[in-house]
Amino acid sequence: MILYNVTVSIDPAVALEWVEWMRSKHIPDVMATGCFLESRFSRVNGEEENGFTYATTYLAESQEKLDTYQTTFAPALKQEHSERYLGKFAAFRTFLTVIEEFK
């Protein structure tokens, strides 16, 4: 399993609208690609000086599924986000390989 985590710091002036857009449009669009098994949308605890920070974590069953997402779907989805919130966010992405799960 591969975790794909996208952390975004968003300008407070658009934060509420952005959260709604993420929940109703962007995350469902990512999940509709069929590349991920599940996702979680979280707010990073603690206030940022220049905005709010959120993390979206997606679970892919394999590196191949993640690679398909990255090459086939991610460019357009990233572009849509960037055009909509240009200058109002900073993002970074992390890829993690799950070694073991404890439940």
Image: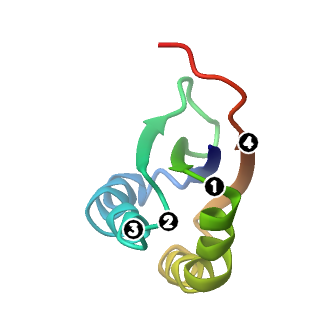
Of the numbered discs 3 and 2, the one sitting upstream in the chain is: 3
Q: Amino acid at mark 4?
A: Leu
Q: Which mark is residue 96?
A: 4
For mark 2, what is the residue?
Answer: 35
The x, y position of residue 64, in whole percent, is 67, 66
Q: CA distance from mark 3 to mark 2?
A: 14 Å
Disc 2 on helix, strand or loop?
Answer: loop
Q: Are marks 2 and 1 in contact (CB under 8 Å)?
A: no
User: Would you place residue 101 above or below residue 31 in this image?
Assistant: above
Mark 2 or mark 1, earlier in chain: 2
Tell whether label 1 touches label 3 (CB within 8 Å): no
Nearer the camera: disc 4 or disc 3: 4
Asked which secondary structure carries label 1, the reply is loop
Work out whether mark 3 precedes mark 1 in sequence or the reverse, and give the earlier one.
3
In this view, the mark in front (3 or 1): 1
Q: Which mark is residue 26?
A: 3
Front residue of this view, candidates 37 and 40: 37
Where is mark 1, residue-wise?
62
Instruction: Characterize the local packing of mark 3: few (<14), some (14-19) or many (20 or more) Cα atoms within 10 angstroms.
Output: some
User: Residue 1, image x and y in percent?
Assistant: 62, 43
Q: Earlier in the sequence, mark 4 or mark 3?
A: 3
Residue 55 is situated, as x and y percent measured from the top left of the image, at 55, 43
